[in-house]
């Protein structure tokens, strides 16, 4: 059992470390992208935005995938010695995903494309990603098949995250078949539907880890079994399958589909916010202090849930959506949620894992992480407002002076872009302050033989 735990610990830390490295690469590419916003002509040849954008977005997607899977390997260990073992499967899965991720980055750097937006690499590279998720599914199934009694919510989330990733990832490649690829409306509808579901599927993986954490930090096992929590899960699942309506606003589909989709995605955010809020108030002071670091990241995510919810509700009003569509307001929404919610939840999980399984942090490291948390969130607020400002400015200029050439329009928005680029550097620095001590802890402590985490009674009291 001790050895199995070591194997999972090793796999978990491999995933977390790789994820953190992609996060650092992602923010570095983001900062370069911000510079291109300011000096588009000067940097056009040296740093083409067509390469930087996919490099940035894919690094961020791999940060999300690697770190959420890392949490799954670390948290899914069982009390009776059965675990998510499969030493070979687990490492093969890691190697496949890593090879695909690194090759994709190299393709972008070399200017080799061939895919669609967000997955712009040559489609053949989708195969190792899909196979690695298949292996993760097999490993997960092996770890839960003898499970007795009803599952806690996080296990359902992990399971549905894996299954729906495989389904929607395959769906996002249907354009390769002429039946879809040759028919514009069908092609776009399937494409955007699959993207909505893909985001939903990795949200499931992230939220599963966040729920596990909340149960552990509060010591309140019932959180993973409350009817409201399950209601949220089913709503999230429904959302994952049907929230794509708002992506195809411009396509000739029924209004009922669009409005239902919007309504569902809004409710989900609200309920997630409510759950974290309730959990927060249920923590005793002692527990709060014991888990201070992850707790702070969870609270930051909660604040961003509410801010993004507010904006998403505004964006969902058709009269407003008409103007915001395709502006920086959409980028503010995308980055506000992936940085503010996804990244904060994943960092909470990484801090928890480092504290619990890899020896924790020194006082200096803790101070740096706290500084990073405040810097990244403070900068994100400025960044988010600047993007919204640029989006509103663009919409107003387009309505008031429809004949204004694009270059002049962008010139007028320059103050917003300056704020965007400077605060982007702040986010990147803040993230580095957090990520580097995490990496250091994982690297230094990984090799040391360490005690299996806490007696079962404490960890699995609620299972
Ligand atoms: C954890 C940190 C970050 C995450 C999770 C993140 C996430 C994202 C996502 C999801 C997009 C795609 C947006 C869309 O499709 O509309 C994006 C685009 C972008 N991001 Fe970030 N980002 C991060 C940090 C940064 C930083 C620090 C900068 C620095 C300025 C930056 C600059 C950009 C730029 C320039 C784009 C392209 C926007 C466009 O298409 O016009 N990002 N980011």
Image: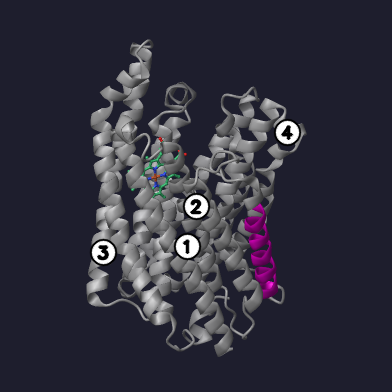
The label number, if any, that marks residue 210 in the structure image: 1
**Residue 145: image location, x then y, percent:** 71, 73
Residue at the disc numbered 3: 370
Secondary element at image label 2: helix
- Residue 63 or 114: which is nearer the viewer? 114
- Residue 141 or 11: which is nearer the viewer? 11
Q: Earlier in the sequence, mark 2 or mark 1?
A: 2
The label number, if any, that marks residue 105 in the structure image: 2
- Of tags 2 and 1, the one toward the viewer is 2
Q: Earlier in the sequence, mark 2 or mark 4?
A: 2
Q: Measured along the vertical axis of the image, is residue 34 above or below residue 202? A: above
Q: Quadrant of ligand 1?
A: top left
- Of tags 1 and 4, the one toward the viewer is 4
Residue at the disc numbered 4: 180
Q: Earlier in the sequence, mark 4 or mark 3?
A: 4
Q: Answer few, some or many: residues within 10 Å of disc 2's Cα (few below 14, many 20 plus, some between 14 and 19).
A: some
Number of numbered tags placed on the structure image: 4
Tag 1–tag 4 contact (CB < 8 Å):
no
In the rendered structure, the answer to whether residue 17 lies left or right of residue 425 reads right
Q: CA distance from mark 4 to mark 3?
A: 49 Å
Secondary element at image label 1: helix
Give the residue displayed 26% in from the left and 71% down from the top: 366
- Residue 227 or 203: which is nearer the viewer? 203
Residue 194 seen from this side: yes
Q: CA distance from mark 1 to mark 3?
A: 19 Å
In the current view of this chain or complex, which residue is farthest to the right? Answer: 179
């Amino acid at each position: 059992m001790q050895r199995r735990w070591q194997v999972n610990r090793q796999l978990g830390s491999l995933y977390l470390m790789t994820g953190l490295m992609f996060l650092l690469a992602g923010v570095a590419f983001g900062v370069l992208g911000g510079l291109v916003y300011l000096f588009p002509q000067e940097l056009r040849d040296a740093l083409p935005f067509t390469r930087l954008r996919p490099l940035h977005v894919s690094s961020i997607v791999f940060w999300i995938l690697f770190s959420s899977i890392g949490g799954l390997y670390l948290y899914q260990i069982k009390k009776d010695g059965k675990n998510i073992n499969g030493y070979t499967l687990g490492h093969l899965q890691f190697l496949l995903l890593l090879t695909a991720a690194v090759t994709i980055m190299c393709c972008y750097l070399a200017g080799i494309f061939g895919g669609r937006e967000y997955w712009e690499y040559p489609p053949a590279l989708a195969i190792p990603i899909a196979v690695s998720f298949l292996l993760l599914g097999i490993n997960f199934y092996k770890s839960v098949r003898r499970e007795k009694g009803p599952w806690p919510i996080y296990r359902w989330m992990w399971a549905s995250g894996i299954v729906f990733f495989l389904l929607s990832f395959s769906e996002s490649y249907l354009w390769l078949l002429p039946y879809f690829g040759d028919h514009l409306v069908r092609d776009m509808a399937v494409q955007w539907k699959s993207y909505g579901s893909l985001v939903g599927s990795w949200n499931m993986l992230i939220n599963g880890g966040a729920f596990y954490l909340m149960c552990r930090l509060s010591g309140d096992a019932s959180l993973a079994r409350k009817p409201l929590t399950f209601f949220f899960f089913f709503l999230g699942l429904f959302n994952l399958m049907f929230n794509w309506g708002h992506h195809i606003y411009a396509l000739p589909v029924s209004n009922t589909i669009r409005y239902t989709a919007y309504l569902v995605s809004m409710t989900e955010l609200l309920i997630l916010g409510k759950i974290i809020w309730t959990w927060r108030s249920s923590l005793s002071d002692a527990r709060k202090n014991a888990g201070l670091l992850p707790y702070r990241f969870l609270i930051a995510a909660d604040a961003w849930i509410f801010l993004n919810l507010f904006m998403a509700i505004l964006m969902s009003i058709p009269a407003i959506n008409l103007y915001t569509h395709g502006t920086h307001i959409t980028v503010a929404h995308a980055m506000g949620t992936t940085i503010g919610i996804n990244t904060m939840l994943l960092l909470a999980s990484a801090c928890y894992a480092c504290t619990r399984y890899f020896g924790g942090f020194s006082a200096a490291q803790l101070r740096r992480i706290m500084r990073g948390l405040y810097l990244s969130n403070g900068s994100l607020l400025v960044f988010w407002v600047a993007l919204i400002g640029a989006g509103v400015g663009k919409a107003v200029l387009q309505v008031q002076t429809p004949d204004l050439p694009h270059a002049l329009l962008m010139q007028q928005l320059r103050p917003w872009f300056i704020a965007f680029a400077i605060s982007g550097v702040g986010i990147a620095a803040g993230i580095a302050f957090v990520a580097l001590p995490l990496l250091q802890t994982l690297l230094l402590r990984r090799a040391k033989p360490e005690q299996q985490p806490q007696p079962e009674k404490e960890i699995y009291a609620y299972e």
